[in-house]
């Protein structure tokens, strides 16, 4: 069974009596306290990026790893934000129809993941998980560093908001580990991934501002979306009143699946269960506060 209520057992352990310090208000999933590895001092920094506050922690002394993680987040913003005039997306919107536009390899990777998710969920969502928002057709040509994007219509516009933030979290974790960090957490507005440690987390109820201890996350990712009245999210679908979390090995998968699953009439459908198995994910629909 891949659905639960309030608490789950996937990559998380319930946190019933952990320390309750002032939570980070930057997202729907908040850090409840410092990691439980009390013998290890932590280096923690936060910066405004990706339209939110990005909070990253690494063991003390891993300064280069912390810098590499933030550099990765900044690179994703430069490449994939529609608010950056020189981003790949902005340049694609200005390109002529049929003109191949060379992409940064990271942008190409995210677009390939978006295409994969669209094809896997087209019937489930009636095509709603579409980074082109139904505005027009597009294709990718080439591979790796030689990937080009081709718009097939003047109206084609892209928005990677349902995917790029989670992908940026994953890339930041990967870069921190590659630069020598033995453990790391990255929290970008509620899209959270931890590696090499166990981290207490809490849920923030947007309507009343309350925070509830929820679980401990270990070596995995969680993304939470709140589609109830008064929340910032806005999505049409049968579960639009839901407050749900998805737990998966990678944050990009969890980020995308929250949007896809909120549009389902039932989380017990065979197609939903197959999708969750494919991405090694679990979904938790939270009770009303």
Image (tube, grey):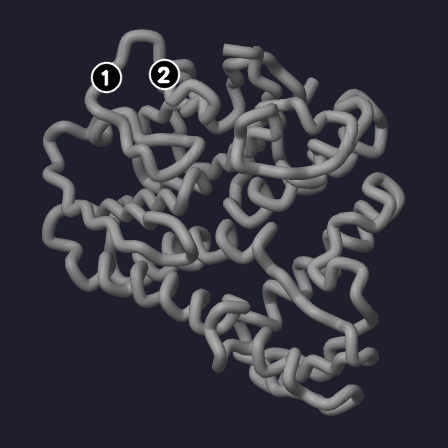
Q: Where, quadrant-wise, is the N terminus in this rendering?
A: top right
The residues tagged by marks 1 and 2 sit, at their Cα atoms, a distance apart of 8 Å
Query: Which residue is located at x 60 percent, y 63 percent?
Result: 110
Residue drawn at (54%, 57%), measured in percent from left and top? 164
Q: Secondary structure at mark 1?
A: loop
What residue is at 73 percent from the left and 63 percent from the top? 132
Q: Do the residues bearing badges 1 and 2 touch, measured as CB atoms within 8 Å?
A: yes
Vertical comparison of 160 with 210: above or below: below
Residue in the picture at 79% in, 88% down: 98
Relative to residue 264, is residue 180 drawn left or right? left
Image position of 143 with respect to 167: above or below: below
Classify residue 267 as left or right of residue 224. right
Quarter occupied by residue 274: top right
Left or right: 85 as drawn, with respect to 147: left
Mark 2 element type: strand
Return the residue at label 1. Answer: 20
Q: Badge 1, how many Cα within 10 Å: few under 14, some, many 20+?
A: some
The earlier-in-sequence mark between 1 and 2 is: 1
Whole-percent x, y for residue 184 in the image = 29, 46
Q: Quadrant of residue 35?
A: top left
Q: Position of residue 76 (x, y in %)?
A: 45, 66
With 181 as the anchor, is 73 left or right in this view? right
Q: In the depicted view, which residue is nearer to us: 181 or 156?
A: 156
**Percent from the top left, x then y, of residue 224?**
52, 33
Q: How many marks?
A: 2
**On screen, 85 above or below 168?**
below
Hey, which residue is sitting farthest top in the picture? 17
Image coordinates for residue 159, horizontal then vertical, percent: 63, 61
The residue identified by callout 2 is 213
Q: Residues within 10 Å of mark 2 (few under 14, many from 20)?
A: many
């Amino acid at each position: 069974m891949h659905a639960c209520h309030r608490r789950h057992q996937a990559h998380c352990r319930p946190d019933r009596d952990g320390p309750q310090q002032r939570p980070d208000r930057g997202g729907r999933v908040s850090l409840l306290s410092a990691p439980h590895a009390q013998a290890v001092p932590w280096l923690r920094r936060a910066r405004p990026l990706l339209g939110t506050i990005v909070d990253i922690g690494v063991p003390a002394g891993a300064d280069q790893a912390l810098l590499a993680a933030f550099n990765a987040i900044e690179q994703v913003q430069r490449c994939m934000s529609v608010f950056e005039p020189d981003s790949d997306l902005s340049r694609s919107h200005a390109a002529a129809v049929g003109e191949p536009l060379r992409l940064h390899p990271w942008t190409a990777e995210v677009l390939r993941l978006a295409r994969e998710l669209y094809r896997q969920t087209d019937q489930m969502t009636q095509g709603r998980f579409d980074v082109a928002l139904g505005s027009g057709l597009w294709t990718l040509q080439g591979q790796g560093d030689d990937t080009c994007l081709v718009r097939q219509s003047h109206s084609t516009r892209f928005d990677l908001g349902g995917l790029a933030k989670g992908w940026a979290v994953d890339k930041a974790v990967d870069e921190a580990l590659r630069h020598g960090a033995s453990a790391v957490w990255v929290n970008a507005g509620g899209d959270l991934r931890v590696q090499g440690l166990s981290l207490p987390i809490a849920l923030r109820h947007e309507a009343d501002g309350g925070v509830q201890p929820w679980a401990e996350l270990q070596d995995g990712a969680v993304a939470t979306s709140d589609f109830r009245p008064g929340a910032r999210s806005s999505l049409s679908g049968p579960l639009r009143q839901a407050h749900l979390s998805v737990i998966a090995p990678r944050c990009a998968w969890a980020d995308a699946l929250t949007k896809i699953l909120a549009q389902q009439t039932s989380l017990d459908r065979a197609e939903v269960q197959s999708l969750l198995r494919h991405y090694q994910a679990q979904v938790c629909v939270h009770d009303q506060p």
